[in-house]
Image (cartoon, rainbow, N blue to C red):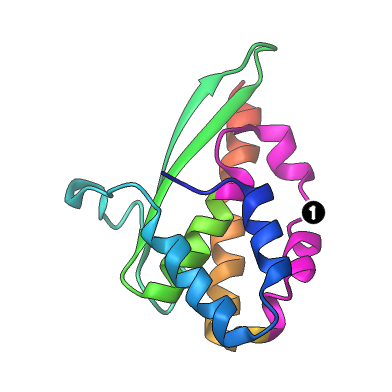
Amino acid sequence: MATPLDEILENFEFLDDWEDRYRYVIELGRTLPEFSEEDRTEENKVRGCVSQVWLTRSVDRGANGEPVITYKGDSDAHIVRGLVAIVLAVFSGHNASEILDTDIDGIFNKIGLREHLTPQRSNGLTAMVERIRDDARSALAAA
């Protein structure tokens, strides 16, 4: 079962050492639900990531009629899989306008994530976020 964002943020506050934080990110990746082999397609692959990252989405209508987007994700790298878990905790299950309004940089800054990632991982993280925001824009346009 995926870890809620509030719990992730709270846990990061208690971890002072970045070695502990990296271990926690890896542990978060282990909480992701099973990702099927059928979903490991080129269409679901996130471009711009050095590691392989896949995201699937389902779009439903929320109570107000706005699209709500739910994601599943996976990666072939342990730390990146943990980053996928954090990104999904932020965005999955929210309506499209909330996704677009989310201050993801503020969240990443709060946990000090970006300055402790290699440039390749940071680029991959940005690619995941942009893919999700593109999905939200498309879902709103189709609504």
The furthest residue to the front: 14
| Residue 96 within the segment the image draws in magenta | yes
Q: Which residue is painted at 26% across and 48% down in the image?
A: 39
Q: Seen in the image, is 40 located left or right of residue 75?
A: left
Q: For numbered disc 1, what is the local secondary structure?
A: loop
- Image position, residue 137 (x, y; %): 65, 39
- Image position, residue 9 (x, y; %): 69, 58
Quarter of the image for the C terminus: give it.
Answer: top right
Nearer to me, 35 or 41 = 35
Q: Amino acid at mark 1?
A: Asp
Q: Seen in the image, is 101 located left or right of residue 68?
A: right
Q: Quadrant of residue 69?
A: top right
Judge the density around disc 1: few (<14), some (14-19), many (≥20) Cα neighbours within 10 Å. Answer: few
Q: Seen in the image, is 108 located left or right of residue 53?
A: right
Q: Is residue 54 visible?
A: no
Residue extent of the magenta highlight: 89-115
Above or below — where is 46 with respect to 71?
below
| Residue 47 within the segment the image draws in magenta | no
- Image position, residue 81 (x, y; %): 42, 66
Nearer to me, 124 or 43 = 124
The furthest residue to the left: 37
- Image position, residue 116 (x, y; %): 65, 85
| Most common secondary structure along the magenta stretch | helix
Above or below — where is 49 with respect to 87?
below
Q: Is residue 100 visible?
A: yes
Q: Which residue is painted at 56% across and 58% down in the image?
A: 86
Q: Which residue is mark 1?
A: 103
Quarter of the image for the N terminus: give it.
Answer: top left
Nearer to me, 11 or 4 = 11
Q: Which residue is painted at 56% across and 34% down in the image?
A: 93
